[in-house]
């Protein structure tokens, strides 16, 4: 079994500056419609962005679009990620945290 770990931290105020500068076009480039609809704040979106970055670091995968990955939540609230452009079988666990002006995500990625 191969196990990799990836993590990412996002400075929320800088993330908000990027959103303000790029507007809806920026949001549409990075986040799926589902992710945008589920996010309750820019802080939530920063956590989703950190999750996607952490996933890329852990998996080593490359995609043509940020939409190839989608962060969602189980009914319990536990975050997860689904990938649309990947045929390889893998599993991963995600943890997202927020503290003050930072969002942090850690991904543990594993495959047989």
Image (tube, rainbow, N blue to C red):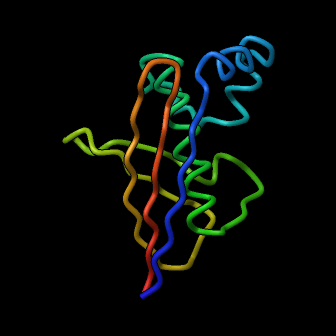
- In front: 15, or 87? 15
Which quadrant holds the C terminus?
Answer: bottom left
Q: On screen, 19 above or below 78?
A: above
- In front: 9, or 37? 9
- In front: 27, or 100? 100
Residue at 35% over, 45% down: 79
Horizontal relation, residue 31 to residue 4: left or right: right
Q: On screen, 27 above or below 81?
A: above
Quadrant position of residue 46: top right
Residue 56 percent coordinates (x, y): 62, 58
Residue 103 percent coordinates (x, y): 50, 31
Which quadrant holds the N terminus?
Answer: bottom left
- In front: 83, or 96? 96
Residue at 70% over, 18% down: 19
Q: On screen, 3 above or below 22?
A: below
Residue 38 percent coordinates (x, y): 42, 27
Residue 18 percent coordinates (x, y): 74, 20
Residue at 47% over, 84% down: 2
Quadrant position of residue 88: bottom right
Q: How many marks?
A: 0
């Amino acid at each position: 079994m191969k196990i990799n770990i990836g993590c990412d931290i996002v400075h929320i105020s800088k993330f908000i500056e990027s959103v303000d500068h790029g507007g809806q076009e920026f949001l549409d480039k990075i986040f799926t419609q589902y992710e945008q609809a589920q996010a309750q704040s820019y802080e939530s979106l920063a956590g989703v962005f950190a999750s996607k970055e952490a996933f890329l670091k852990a998996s080593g995968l490359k995609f043509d679009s940020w939409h190839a990955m989608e962060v969602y939540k189980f009914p319990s609230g536990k975050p997860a990620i689904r990938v649309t452009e990947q045929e390889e079988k893998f599993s991963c666990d995600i943890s997202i945290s927020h503290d003050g002006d930072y969002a942090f995500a850690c991904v543990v990625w594993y495959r047989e």
